[in-house]
């Protein structure tokens, strides 16, 4: 195993390129999403192997509702089958599953399957995997501010941070967006203030341990100053 001097505590991933991966091969877009699920599992295993404690996957954004019903239903079917397996990766490896975003609009059976698995894994501590579902960074901030206004308290940076959907986990140290696109796409906007960003050109379905290690090696070279002197 590659020896690394430091690894990020929390990695956040924008899984980009599923549709383009499929289109390039003359396949339906949902087959790209299916292969993307395999990349999620490979990445979770890599996180366990290299000692990452938190990993957040941008699985379904607030903007994804603009896609075709066929594609949305396909994504829901994949998520449903993935988290409903009896011997899933979370139970087998004592991984805690959590989610951020507003899942109220999701199908009832999908919400139940997700909440059931979250309940079963809530005391696991080897790794916490977070699925961002119906999540948008701006929406997250608005909901956090409204929550604080209702409490009647003066609003400060720390209170906003703690009131976000990610309030009980650390901010991401390292953000990976696959496919070569260099945008944040409304993901963890407040939380990314000092995250290191990395944009490999590989499409998400092809992302594997080799790419993961290459990303971690790039992180080794970063000098995180958090706004301090260079």
Image (cartoon, grey):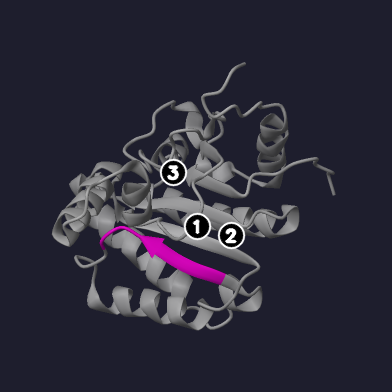
Dot 2 or dot 3, earlier in sequence = 3
- Residue that appears at 30% across and 52% down: 135
| Dot 3 or dot 1, earlier in sequence | 3
Q: Real-space Cα distance between discs 1 and 2?
A: 6 Å
Q: How far from the left and from the top, in percent, is residue 45?
A: 67, 59
Instruction: Answer whether residue 16 is magenta in the image.
Output: no
Q: Is residue 168 left or right of residue 68?
A: right
Kindly report the secondary structure that dominates the magenta region of the rendered protein. Answer: strand
Mark on residue 18?
Answer: 3
Could you say whether the residue bearing mark 2 is in a helix, strand or loop? Answer: helix
What residue is shown at x 16% (from left), y 54% (from top)? 149
**Left of 88 or right of it: where is 17?**
left
Name the residue tied to disc 1.
37
Residue named by callout 2: 41
Q: Is residue 33 left or right of residue 50?
A: left
Under circle 3, the secondary element is: helix
Q: Which residues, given as a range, are shown in magenta?
A: 96-102
In the rendered image of this protein, does residue 76 appear above or below residue 193?
A: below
Q: Position of residue 14 (x, y in %)?
A: 45, 42
- Mark 2 crowd level (few <14, some 14–19, many ≥20, 10 Å Cα): some
In the image, 195: left or right of 133?
A: right
Asked if residue 133 is positioned above or below residue 122 in the image, the reply reads above
Q: Quadrant of the C terminus?
A: top right
Along the viewing direction, whichever of 153 and 127 lies nearer the viewer:
153
């Amino acid at each position: 195993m590659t020896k690394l001097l430091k690894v990020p505590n929390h990695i956040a991933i924008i899984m980009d390129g599923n549709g383009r991966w499929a289109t390039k091969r003359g396949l339906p877009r949902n087959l790209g999403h299916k292969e993307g699920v395999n990349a999620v599992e490979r990445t979770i295993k890599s996180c366990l192997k290299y000692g990452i404690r938190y990993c957040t996957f941008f699985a379904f954004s607030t903007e994804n509702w603009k896609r075709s019903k066929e594609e949305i239903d396909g994504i829901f079917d994949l998520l449903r089958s993935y988290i409903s397996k009896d011997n899933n990766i979370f139970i087998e490896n004592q991984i805690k599953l959590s989610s951020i975003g507003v899942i109220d609009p999701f199908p009832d059976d999908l919400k139940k399957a997700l909440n059931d698995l979250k309940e079963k894994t809530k005391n696991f501590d080897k790794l916490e995997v977070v699925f961002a579902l119906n999540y948008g960074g701006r929406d997250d901030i608005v909901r956090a501010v409204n929550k604080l206004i209702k409490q009647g308290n003066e609003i400060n940076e720390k209170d906003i941070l703690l009131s976000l959907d990610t309030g009980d986990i650390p901010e991401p140290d390292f953000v990976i967006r696959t496919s070569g696109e260099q945008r944040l796409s409304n993901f963890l906007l407040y939380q990314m203030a000092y995250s290191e960003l990395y944009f490999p050109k590989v499409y998400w379905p092809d992302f594997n341990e080799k790419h993961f290690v290459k990303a971690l090696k790039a992180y080794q070279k970063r000098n995180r100053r958090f706004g301090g002197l260079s």
